[in-house]
Amino acid sequence: MPNKAYNWPELEEMLFMRTIKRQPVTLVRGLGARVWDDEGREYLDFMGGWAVNSLGHCHPAVVKAITKQVQTLIHTSNQFYTVPQIKLAQVLVEHSCLDRVFFCNSGAEANEGAMKLARRYGKLYLDGAYEIVTTRNSFHGRTLAMVAATGQNKFQEPYIPLPNGFINVDYDNVEAIKAAISPKTCAVMLEPVQGEGGVNVPSNNYLKEIKTCCDKKGVLLILDEVQTGIGRMGSLFAYEKYGVEPDIMTLAKGLGSGVPIGAFMAKEQFAVFTVGDHGSTFGGSPLICSASLAALEFIIKHNIPDQVKRVGKYFKNRLEKLKQQFDFISEIRGDGLLLALGFTNDISQEILQSCLREGLLINSVKPDAIRFTPPLIIDENDVDKALHILESVFTRR
Ligand SMILES: Cc1ncc(COP(=O)(O)O)c(C=O)c1O
């Protein structure tokens, strides 16, 4: 239903700090893999709220759970037991290799918590080791410590001096990690596939070799599955795909299918927090956890990761064919429904604008690459429609 009461962009311009360049569209409604703007125009959403809307927009299971919970109990402090967070923890533990969970509100917060846990472990069992090795081109969030962990100069430079204790080395380079680990190291933290860094997939054995190296040196492996987790790569967690079990894992984005939630999980022997070591006012609230529980149960019950595998393969094949048609496409990266098209030059903004005009939402993840993170529930017809738009945009260049 059109809802153009104000010039929203003009109002936004007056009110907000200038941290983001928005696209010239005001979205007012969503359903499944589609959204509508305030003029009633429909868009196919292959961005999924930056990989958040795992079940698409307003999925009935999520809407039902939120509606019921909002009329029952929205928030209490964590001083008390509440049922939805315990049920959600139970499902996460039952379906992963990790034993304990802590709920928070975002990916950055999940990573902060995971790193605090690793430092705590370092203090207790590794002679005070506190350094954490991360990789260049990674993305772990926007808090000061996560900016230090994120190995990208553009995020770090404006805030120097940064918190210390973080070492950024090359991704997909086992020797670089080995060389960076010292007696001061408590953990290595990696994304199984770098998302914001451009959808960079490591060599087949990379994660396995890193895990072996961490085990040998007695340091923890933290996998940041904020973007890759909850079915996005065709398995519930990306670590399953690579045959590696993390000691600590972080989640957010798709875990809530649209509601703000983060979590970090650890194996029993590394879950060394005791009372008072960490906390959160909003983390694990009944409202958010009931929505997340409904989403996660649906994803597991309907084997959405398998669907992601099938549709992702179809999507990737179609992109490969597109690559054969247009010589400015240099490569296809990613797996499942975390895919990117690399270009020979910096045209991603131009492509994004053209797609937007044609009714397709995509993300410009690098000046020379666009990224697709659609809802996990898309099917082959949605892929065909997106490919049709991409093809016509590419043909008209
Ligand atoms: C791998 C990864 N970790 C952490 C984050 C930060 O998450 P949030 O924006 O919820 O703090 C992101 C966000 O894009 C991410 O992709």
Image: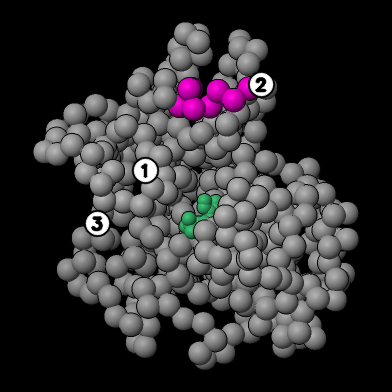
2 or 3: mark nearer the eye: 2
218 to the left or right of 397:
right
> Residue 149 or 217: which is nearer the viewer?
149
Q: Where residue 364 sits: x, y (%)?
A: 51, 34
Disc 1 is placed on an element classified as: loop
The single residue placed furthest to the left in the displayed view is 5
Residue 192 in view in this figure: no
| Type of amino acid at the residue the image marks with label 2 | Thr
Query: Could you tell me which secondary element the residue under label 2 belongs to?
Result: loop
Q: Position of residue 137 (x, y in %)?
A: 67, 47
* Residue 394 coordinates in the image, percent (x, y): 51, 13
| Kind of residue at disc 3 | Lys
Query: Dot 3: within a 10 Å radius of its alpha carbon, few (fewer than 14), some, or many (20 or more) residues?
Result: some
Mark closest to the chain's N terminus, 2 or 1:
1
Report the mark closest to the observer, 2 or 1: 2
Check disc 1 and report the residue beneath it. 56
| Prevailing secondary structure of the magenta residues | helix
C-alpha separation, residue under disc 2 versus residue under disc 1: 32 Å
Q: Kindly report the distance in space between the C-alpha atoms of the residues bearing marks 1 and 3.
A: 14 Å
Q: Residue at x 38, y 60 (%)?
A: 260
Residue 211: image quadrant is: bottom right
Give the labeled residue for mark 3: 64
The residue at 46%/15% (across/down) is 393
Q: Are marks 1 and 3 in contact (CB under 8 Å)?
A: no
Q: Secondary structure at mark 3?
A: helix
- To which quarter of the image does residue 134 belong? bottom right
Q: What is the span of residues highlighted in magenta in the rendered image? A: 345-352
